[in-house]
Amino acid sequence: MSALVGPLGGAAGGLLLTGGEAVGRVAPVVGGVLGLGGVAVAALPSRVRMRRELRRRWRTWALAAPVFLGSLFFGEAGAAVLAAGLGLIAVGEYVRMAPGGTAGAERYVLAAAAVVLPLLGWLRPQWLDARLMAVLLLAAALPALLSGDHTTGAARAARTLFGLLWIPAALTGLVLLGGTAVAVGVAVALGDVGAWCGGTALGRRGALARPLSPLSPNKTWAGVLGAAVATAAALAAVGAFTPLLWGAVLTGCVLGDLLESMVKREAGVKDAGSWLPGFGGLLDRIDSLLVAVPLAMVVTL
């Protein structure tokens, strides 16, 4: 599956692109956006309240973009390594946010899945079928079953299964999507920027200022509008726009953030971590991607 599938070729018909070719197509777009963004944040006057925060975010973007695109340049192998690395960090943050912490055995299950599932996507993609769901369900429940936990066992198993599907299984889509993952990743990143711009510019008053959900009052319909415009423009700029893929990416941008907000509110934390400048933790940065990638698989594979 090293060839690009979906809207840029493969199953949807059209020109087949390898991961490297897909990266070559989107790199000028990413470079141009980063360049314009760098000039914009550098020119912000000192009176702008978020100037320091925006500069920190731009520096993080400037470091993250080469890592993401550079990994996908090497096709399925690079995508598997990237997914495993992201998964290990993300499940670590997820475990720390779990109410009361997650027992050691569940931590090992999540960490093992973060590595094994992307490797299977690379080396044995035919094994990733409906039978895997039974394996994941058993793996999630086994620690509580073996320990005889009759008080919180069901909650532990449900929390672990959710983590397995939300993080390792979703990130494995970076491998299975092939070059389409490049377009999805770029569109999600620009969609998050568009949501912030839309919310800042249009979300102060009026109908567009209404929050999407009590889970995150700062996420408004103005942000949805900004994300819709940005994701459509990003997909069109890299030659990957289709209505279905656009819908998948936009849904990921909107619901992915709310999903993580739900987890964080239950845990009583503001951010998933504090090590990623301008964002908090890795989950705060990839929450939209974790929903957009599985939906992109639904509409393209």
Image (cartoon, helix red, strand yellow):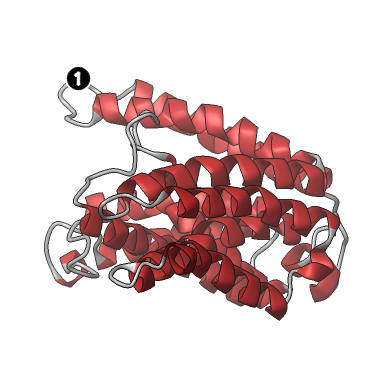
Give 208 or 94, whichever is nearer the viewer.
94
29 sits to left or right of 277: right
Give 229 or 95, whichever is nearer the viewer.
95
Pinpoint residue 63: horizontal percent, then vertical percent.
54, 27
Residue at point 53%, 48% (across, down): 108
Quarter of image, res 78: top right
Q: Which residue is mark 1?
A: 46
How many badges with numbers are in the image? 1
Pinpoint residue 169: horizontal percent, then vertical percent.
60, 62
Q: Quadrant of the N terminus?
A: bottom right
**Residue at the farthest left position:** 205
Residue at point 37%, 73% (across, down): 154
Quarter of image, res 72: top right
**Residue at the farthest bottom position:** 130
Residue 206, relative to residue 266: is it above or below? Answer: below
Residue 124, relative to residue 135: is it above or below? Answer: above
Residue type marked 1: Ser
Asked whether residue 106 appears in the rendered view, the answer is yes
| Label 1 element class | loop
Residue at point 44%, 25% (across, down): 59
Give 247 or 97, whichever is nearer the viewer.
97
Residue at point 74%, 61% (across, down): 176
Task: Count neighbours of disc 1 (C-alpha within 10 A) and say few if under 14, some if 14 to 19, many if 20 or more.
Answer: few
Pinpoint residue 84: horizontal percent, then vertical percent.
64, 45
Pinpoint residue 134: horizontal percent, then vertical percent.
63, 77
Residue 180, relative to residue 37: is it above or below? Answer: below
231 sits to left or right of 73: left
Asked whether residue 242 appears in the rendered view, the answer is no
